[in-house]
Image (cartoon, rainbow, N blue to C red):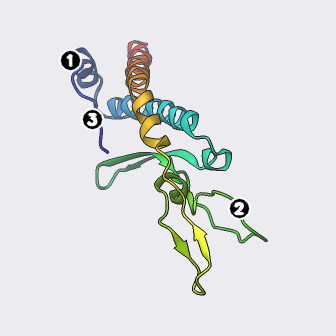
Amino acid sequence: MTEFLTGDKQLDRNLKILGDKVAQKAVGSGIRAGLGEVRKGIRANTDNVSARATIAARFKRRRKQGQTVAKVGAGVGKRKEHSPTGGGVGISKQNAHWYFMGTKARTTRSGANRGQMPASPAVAFGFIQSSGAAMIKMRLKIAAMIEKEAKKLKQ
């Protein structure tokens, strides 16, 4: 799912006045604030405690390609080495898709039934419920950053 922030003409004019570097900084700050709001919404809709811990956000700017990548969801946060444990870990970043997307009916090679997991609509519901608040938070954060940078320029 891709979302674009457009439309606020006064905001666009202010960003053009301030310059590219400051505009990127303000927009990045706004996007991070919006990601946090969506992350909270998804976590609030997730019933499973171990699955709730896998919900994170990632914001990365690739300067050479001129791209900004922002993601929020299950198993999205910073990457780290997987350390083997003595037994099962419940739902972790490595298998969060089982909980959120579900599994078909599974069996072992010998034919023993392992059941299936129904899909959880927590990510979709959480995004829908929090997207409005995220857009408001983004606009407020961008406006605050613009004011802050404008005060710096005036001094």
Q: Which residue lies at the image location 42% right of the left edge and 40% below the top edge?
A: 124
Return the x and y of residue 11 as percentages of the image width and height.
Answer: 27, 19
Dot 3, how many residues are within 10 Å of its Cα: few (below 14), some (14-19), or many (20+)? few
Mark 1 vs mark 3, CA separation in Å: 14 Å
Instruction: Name which of mark 2 and mark 1 comes first in the sequence.
Output: 1
Q: Which of marks 2 and 1 is in front?
A: 2
Q: Is 97 rendered above or below residue 136?
A: below
Residue 144: x %, y % from top left: 43, 17
Residue lying farthest to the right in this orientation: 86
Q: What element carries label 2?
A: loop
Q: Name the residue under label 1.
A: 9
Q: What residue does disc 2 label?
A: 89
Work out whether mark 1 precedes mark 3 in sequence or the reverse, and give the earlier one: 3
- The Cα atoms of the two marked residues, 3 and 2, are separated by 37 Å
The residue type indicated by label 3 comes to: Phe
Mark positioned earlier in the residue sequence (3 or 2)? 3
Three-letter amino acid code of the residue under disc 2: Val
Circle 2/circle 1 CB separation < 8 Å: no
Figure quadrant of residue 83: bottom right
Q: Residue at x 43, y 28 (%)?
A: 129
Along the horizontal axis of the image, is 85 left or right of 103? right
Name the residue that disc number 3 marks: 4
- Residue at point 59% right, 50% down? 54
